Image (cartoon, rainbow, N blue to C red):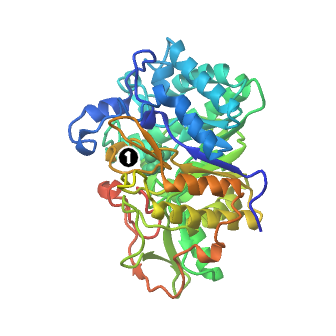
Amino acid sequence: MAYPTDFIWGAAAASFQIEGTTPSCPRGDSIWDAFCDTPGKVFQGHHARQACMHIERWREDVALMKELGLDAYRLSIAWPRVMPDGTGTVNEAGLDFYSDLVNELLASGITPYVTLYHWDLPLKLQQQGGWLNPQIVDWFTDYTRVVVERLSDRVKHWITLNEPQCFVLLGNQTGKHAPGLQLPEADVLRIGHHALLAHGRAVQTIRACSDQPAQIGIAPIGVVAIPQTERKVDIDAARQATFDNAGDTLFSSAWWLDPVFKGRYPESGVEPRLKDMPPIGPEDMAIISQPIDFCAFNLYEAGVVRAGAEGQVERLAYPPGHPMTAMDWPVTPEGLYWASRFLHERYKTPLYITENGLSCRDWVSVDGKVHDPNRIDFLARYLGYAKRACDEGIPLLGYFQWSIMDNFEWAEGYKDRFGLIYVDYATGERIPKDSYDWYRNTIRTGGNELPPWSQCGFMSDQVELEVVVKPRKPLRSDRDNKSQAGASTRRS
Ligand code: GCO
């Protein structure tokens, strides 16, 4: 079988990670600027003031996207570039930048998918409490309106929030990300509730203000458990581990997506947190569960489980030597299929994979090229499993590779490279890697040259796995060492 002919082949990036700043198109400070300025927070004190200087080189970047043959590019808007203080004054030069970028993409045959919030909260808003202040819902609504009024004559696809798990929990509970707070759980839950309300109000705002019928979604991390084998009992165990885990971790997909698609928080997460749950207004869940058009998810890795003798979920550790990325995330291609299948079963909505990719320590070889065979193999394996989802009739509409170019990887600075295009941060030079050519061919051939999914995985009942008896709560160190067996291993 083949990928559907209208499958969207994309790549993604995010404002703070690539844009940089320039006097002709300034931006207000975001919480990430302040975080980078705080000693010890970001690897070797790296900063994204320059990043990839996409703010100056965007035409060259779009030309490379066109050459790659992308159907779509997922970008994010920097709130502080559009509204330097977060509210009030609009920076027209900032809006012009995004408007010109959208025009260039469209002229190149590339559909823009626009994420409204990819973590760069205006610092001025953080100084007023940020996501903990209930007014953030209005602030975000106003910002959304400004962007939609300017771009929606040309932009049809919108993603409200990127990975609420990360910006809420890593930013405010573990302190690993900006704004670097370690708040009590009651505050963290309140922040999460405000984020979901902001999502719902943004959906309403886009629907009300868009010049054309919009396609709207949200992009959490796809936190999923995969079954060690395809025996029904193991599949049931994986489904259960995927959705009944909100008591163990707020990274849980159900914690963020049940409110959006079902209008309620999952009982498994509420019950152990009764004393800390935020006040929930009478209209809140209706706002949060505004109908949306698709569920997006970002997927890099997954936990593995099986059914124990009594049918109970057994969380398993990957065996020694299991393939790992440069960021120490286990390589789990099967996750793309199981996430698609489980999310579709539960939420009955079309899906997009809005991020997937491999971090390597790529460098320029003596021949002047950048050879990244592991990235090619990683992408082929994951795409093999995405194809399986399509073959089985799961409405997976598209795939966005992370990332079109190397960029600022948050607390890891520039250490880890995810790009199809190598960036020399000293000169700004772009060098397409081997994986760029490979992806171009994959797009050109509609995925038809990918290996069959049955050859793409690492899991089987032949692999001896150790049972991790006690699931544990996420640790602060997990951003550096994400291998928590069983549930989400990534960042949870
Ligand atoms: C995130 C973001 C991206 C990352 C990517 C690799 O998940 O952190 O969406 O900005 O760069 O996922 O970690």
Q: Residue 432, percent across and down?
A: 49, 47
Q: Residues within 10 Å of mark 1 (few under 14, many from 20)?
A: many
- The residue under the point 72% across, 41% down is 291
Mark yes or no: residue 354 visible: no
**Vertical side of 199 occupied by 9: above or below:** below
Query: For this rendering, which residue is in front, 242 or 60?
Result: 60
Give residue 147's quadrant in the image.
top right
Q: Is residue 168 above or below residue 120?
A: below
The quadrant of the image that shows the C terminus is bottom left
Which amino acid, by three-letter code, is at mark 1?
Leu
What residue is at 55 percent from the left and 56 percent from the top?
222
Residue 119 in the figure: left or right of residue 286: left
State which quadrant residue 427 falls in: top left
Residue 130 placement (x, y as % from top left): 41, 29
* Residue 69 left/right relative to 377: right
| Residue ID at (62%, 35%) | 200
Residue 383 at what x, y percent from top left? 62, 62
Q: Please, what secondary structure does the residue beneath circle 1 have? A: helix
The residue that disc 1 covers is 170
Q: Residue 149 versus residue 259: which sits nearer the camera?
A: 149
The location of residue 391, given as percent across then percent down, is 75, 66
In depth, the one of 27 and 302 nearer the eye is 27
